[in-house]
Image (cartoon, rainbow, N blue to C red):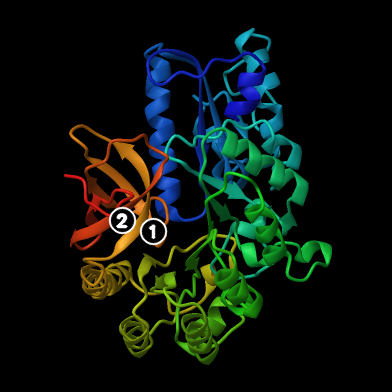
Amino acid sequence: MAGLLSEEGFLLVRGGRADAAVLNTCGFVRAAKEESIEAILSLAAEKRRGRIRRLVVAGCMARRYRDELPELLPEVDLFLGPGDIPDLPGRLSSMLRDEEPSTGDSPQRSLSGGGALPDEAYGHRIPEVGTGSAFLKILEGCDNRCAYCAIPAIRGPLRSRDRESLLAEARLLVRRGARELNLIGQDITAYGLDRGEKGGLVSLVRALCAVRGVRWIRLLYLYPSRVDDGIVDLLRSEEKVCRYLDIPVQHIDPGILRRMGRTYGPDAIYRMIDRLRDGVPGLFLRTSLIVGFPGETRSAFDRLLRFVDEVRWDYLGVFPYSREEGTPAFRMPSQVPERTKEERVRRVRDAQADLLSLGNASRIGQILDVLVEKAGVRGKAVGRHRGQAPEVDGSVVLSGFDGEPGSIIRARVTGAREWDLRGVVVRSGGSESD
């Protein structure tokens, strides 16, 4: 959206007064929807104060609730679904010329959306890569039919992006300073399946590794049953590919997995983990879990808790089940009380925190490559090593740094906390910098 607007002569501003505010929303789970509504109301207050003239709400929530939101939020001038984004500059220009009313009476105030952004729109984006890291979305939509998930209804079926458009965007990101590319999508292991390709993800990643200037490539959001030997070989053979995988398994109890509509059982999960750890030394594994799914008994939850302790994931996110209208799980019997969900979230987080502390402590004394994201005064800086994804896995807090953000340096780990590591920069000759 920022790139499309800039090409049409709009100037991006950070805070202060503006002709328009554009808010991108999430419509996936209740907590994200609540956060989006709070942000809309905050911007609506800014509009009433005269600090912004027009308010645009875009993204998944605008698509999912396109019939209800215009009536509930009359302060919003335009709602755009993900597929409407190329229309934003023209619509906004028209509104600012007062060619359309902003009262909510306009039949065009909410566009229908569509689930996917056209490939050509990605070529207009302004990459935010001041940290040396960028996200590269390789597909839209999902053909998995998990019982709890509204994404197929919002984003539509799987649609893999054209490989040449991805390589062109990767080169653009590198020119703007990216050293790390984080590959994302609702399920990146499905890349190419809509076109009948086999091994599409592995082939794409090998092509991205050949892009000059790319130093790290990270794979995020892989469906467990499609993590195959090709991915193992990719991690072993391509130095640029971080030995890190984010594989949301969601649960381990066989009954809960069946009710969720997942296509694997617990034995397959354990075999996958063993194959990955045996085949890729030094691999970092992250997963996501859902607790409180309908029918999750105490024994099913206890099995999940044992699973966390047995597998010892490097990183783990746990979320209470969000009851989403329009999904099969919404009408399932044996809904779990909210208080029970929150207690189970706490217990999983506590168990994982202990494991994370032990894992970080074991890295003291190691020398790691670190991508510096922020630089402060007196040699202080913050970055991440190859085993830490952006925003979710903690940081490496550095001393002795005298370069610019976006650079990759060597650092010796000198200390550890629950989430973060402390380190000191190691000079090329092996000496440490104060």
Amino acid type of the residue that numbered disc 2 sits on in the rendered structure = Gly
The residue that appears at 33% across and 35% down in the rendered structure is: 403
User: Horizontal and vertical percent for residue 329?
Assistant: 54, 71
Amino acid type of the residue that numbered disc 1 sits on in the rendered structure = Gln
Asked if the residue at tag 1 contacts the one at tag 2, i.e. Cβ–Cβ closer than 8 Å, the answer is: yes
Distance from disc 2 to disc 1, alpha carbons, whole Å, reads 7 Å
The residue that appears at 39% across and 43% down in the rendered structure is: 35
Checking the image for residue 111, the label placed there is: none
**In terms of depth relative to the viewer, which is nearer, 374 or 394?**
374
Rendered-image quadrant of the N terminus: top right
Q: Earlier in the sequence, mark 2 or mark 1?
A: 1
Q: Looking at this rendering, what residue extends furthest in the front direction?
A: 429
User: Horizontal and vertical percent for residue 135?
Assistant: 54, 47
**In this image, 394 relative to 279: left or right?**
left
The residue that appears at 51% across and 19% down in the rendered structure is: 12
Q: Which residue is under mark 1?
A: 388
The residue that appears at 59% across and 48% down in the rendered structure is: 136
Q: Quadrant of residue 125?
A: top right
